[in-house]
Image (cartoon, rainbow, N blue to C red):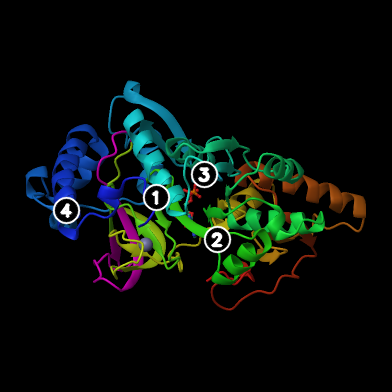
Amino acid sequence: MGNYYQQEIETASREKILEIQNEKIVRQVKHVYENVPYYKKLMDKKGVKPSDIKSIDDIKKLPFLSKDDLREAYPYGLLGTDIKNCVRIQSTSGTTGKRVVAFYTQHDIDIWEECCARAIMAAGGTNEDVCQVCYGYGLFTGGPGLNGGSHKVGCLTLPMSSGNTDRQIQFMMDLNATILCCTPSYAAYIGETLAEKGYRPEDNKLKAGIFGAEPWTEEMRQSIQKSLGIKAYDIYGLTEISGPGVAFECEEQTGMHINEDHFYVEVIDPKTGEVLPEGAKGELVFTSLDKEGFPLLRYRTKDICILSREKCSCGRTHVKMTKPLGRSDDMMIIRGVNVFPSQIEAVLLNEGYTPNYQIVLDRVNNTDTFDIYVELSPEMFSDKIADIQRREIGLNAAMRSMLGIGPKIHLVAPKSIARSEGKAVRMIDKRRLH
Ligand code: ADP
Ligand code: ZN
């Protein structure tokens, strides 16, 4: 017997899930067509009407949405209900130009938190647990999502937010935290810090961790499990579709069950948009079946994945996705923050630098390092160290304000970054995450 939050739906037969999806999609498409002029226009352009959507199979007829649409429609263009019905806004990590805001009604928050509650219970959580949430709170979905899920399960919730590792450890030890929720890199860092302070893995009361929002490897899982003495579970989500809890791992730890009663998933060829058969590797596309505030249909995530319907020993019947195996765009996730090279370029040009730069990412002690090498123009070049340092500090601040995280800036002499013959090699990622 597994540990479920909503056993009936989590273990429902394939037929039952399809029945739910068929019913919800018809209603949702009608709702979106009538309430979201931006999407209505896309449907009209494609010549599809709500009456063409009779079951979930017909979803193929609908147009895709991408991050570009979200940007174009910013801020209210994809709102699915009167703003007065909304109670919350969340936003993706990072950035100006690429910022995405998502709206939630109370109903949407409830669904989202229930999905997080399913994840917590799949990790063995009950109302006797003490759940320490050290994802960031605020616009970022990590903190609020797991916080809500923890409440729904009835755990004693420690809303720590991120940072201040000494205090995290003090609360963890003094208040007997049993479940830890944060990014995998932060979990690894907490593990190391505990060891530095002389704690052994068995000294804490933790039994499980729910880690996501960024890519992490199986090796990293093993190392976190060992350093904290826990079982480590993956959780996946994105702000556009609600936040963490779109999919979560069960005790089998072989992929994440997608909450298919709320989110319909397809895998497509990122080049042609063709829907691929089960088991094929491609880009994940999600349709939110019952969200009111921000009801995205066929949203292209850019995350590359494989789906599997193999029977799972946990009893859950919902389809499983692999960890994201890569992305079909150039987005980097650095310490949990989404960063695009184009943003870095924009800052450089704004600040009067040449667009000759190189980003180097690495992972040292399980924490991402983020270095940018930037060429000075001959006019900027100076042999005074103080001048260079002043420039580096200024550029770091400008990057931090654009990206939400600060890189280490290295200003280098004109023409010292190797020019490439073809496409410039802008980014060297040594983290080996996939
Ligand atoms: P989140 O709050 O979940 O980080 P964002 O909208 O900021 O949401 O970022 C979503 C992206 O983060 C996803 O499209 C995916 O690329 C990445 N992501 C989220 N969870 C995971 C995970 N468990 N493993 C790998 N990548 C993840
Ligand atoms: Zn399972």
424 or 110, which lies in front?
110
Residue nearest the viewer, comparing 349 with 264: 264
Q: Residue furthest top?
A: 84
Mark 2–mark 4 CB contact (< 8 Å): no
Residue at 36% in and 50% down: 4
Q: Quadrant of ligand 2?
A: bottom left
The reply, left or right, for residue 325 in relation to residue 300 is right
Quadrant location of the N terminus in the rendered image: bottom left
- Residue 87 occupies which quadrant of the picture? top left
342 lies left or right of 272: right
Few, some or many residues within 10 Å of mark 3 (<14, 14–19, 20+): many
- Note whether ligand 2 is within 8 Å of mark 2: no
Where disc 1 sits, the SS reads helix
The part of the chain drawn in magenta is 266-293
Residue 231 is tagged as 2
Q: Is residue 273 magenta?
A: yes
Residue type at mark 2? Lys
Look at the magenta stretch and give its main secondary structure.
loop
Q: Amino acid at mark 3?
A: Gly
- What is the distance, in whole Å, between disc 2 and disc 4 at their CAs? 31 Å
At 30% from the left edge and 44% from the top edge, which residue is drawn? 296
Q: Which residue is mark 4?
A: 16
Front position in the image: 358 or 305: 305
Name the residue located 60 percent from the left edge and 69 percent from the top edge: 222
Q: Which tag, 3 or 4, sits closer to the chain's start?
A: 4
Q: Which residue is mark 3?
A: 142
Query: Residue 172's spot in the image, x, y percent?
Result: 68, 44
Residue 146 lies, in percent from the top left, at 49, 42
Q: Which residue is mark 1?
A: 67
